[in-house]
Image (cartoon, rainbow, N blue to C red):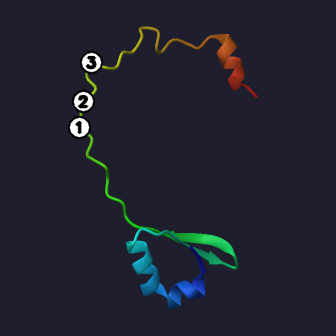
């Protein structure tokens, strides 16, 4: 849903209820979006250190310079 700033100020309680229901509201000034109201989503889960131990391997040449054939792709 998109509303202008004036409508957002006068209908804040209604917009808050809609956001609590999961909707995102875009607030615009003169038709140009300037802000977004949205529900706060909880983090999926806390990261735990060491959960991929033994599953990731770094090759011995990991920090060696890249070949010229690849480097030339990044030059302007």
Foreground of the two, 26 or 65: 26
Residue bearing mark 1 = 48
> Looking at the picture, how far across and down is residue 65, in whole percent?
56, 13
Residue bearing mark 2 = 51
Q: Are marks 2 and 1 in contact (CB under 8 Å)?
A: yes
Q: Dot 1: what SS?
A: loop
Gap in angstroms between the C-alphas marked 3 and 1: 15 Å
Specify the quadrant that holds the C terminus. top right
> Looking at the picture, how far across and down is residue 61, in whole percent?
47, 9
In the figure, 63 relative to 14: above or below? Answer: above
Mark 2, residues whose alpha carbon is within 10 Å: few (<14), some, or many (≥20)? Answer: few
Residue bearing mark 3 = 54
Relative horizontal placement of residue 66, taking residue 41 as reference (left or right): right
Gap in angstroms between the C-alphas marked 3 and 2: 9 Å
Residue 39 picture quarter:
bottom left
Relative horizontal placement of residue 41, taking residue 37 as reference (left or right): left
Q: How many marks?
A: 3
Q: Which comes before the other along the chain, label 3 or label 1?
A: 1
Q: Dot 3: what SS?
A: loop
């Amino acid at each position: 849903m998109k509303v202008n700033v004036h409508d957002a100020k006068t209908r804040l309680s209604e917009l808050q209820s809609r956001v609590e229901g999961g909707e995102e509201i875009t607030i615009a000034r003169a038709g140009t979006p300037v802000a977004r109201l949205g529900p706060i989503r909880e983090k999926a889960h806390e990261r735990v250190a060491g959960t991929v131990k033994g599953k990731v391997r770094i090759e011995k040449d990991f920090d060696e310079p890249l070949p010229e054939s690849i480097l030339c792709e990044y030059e302007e």
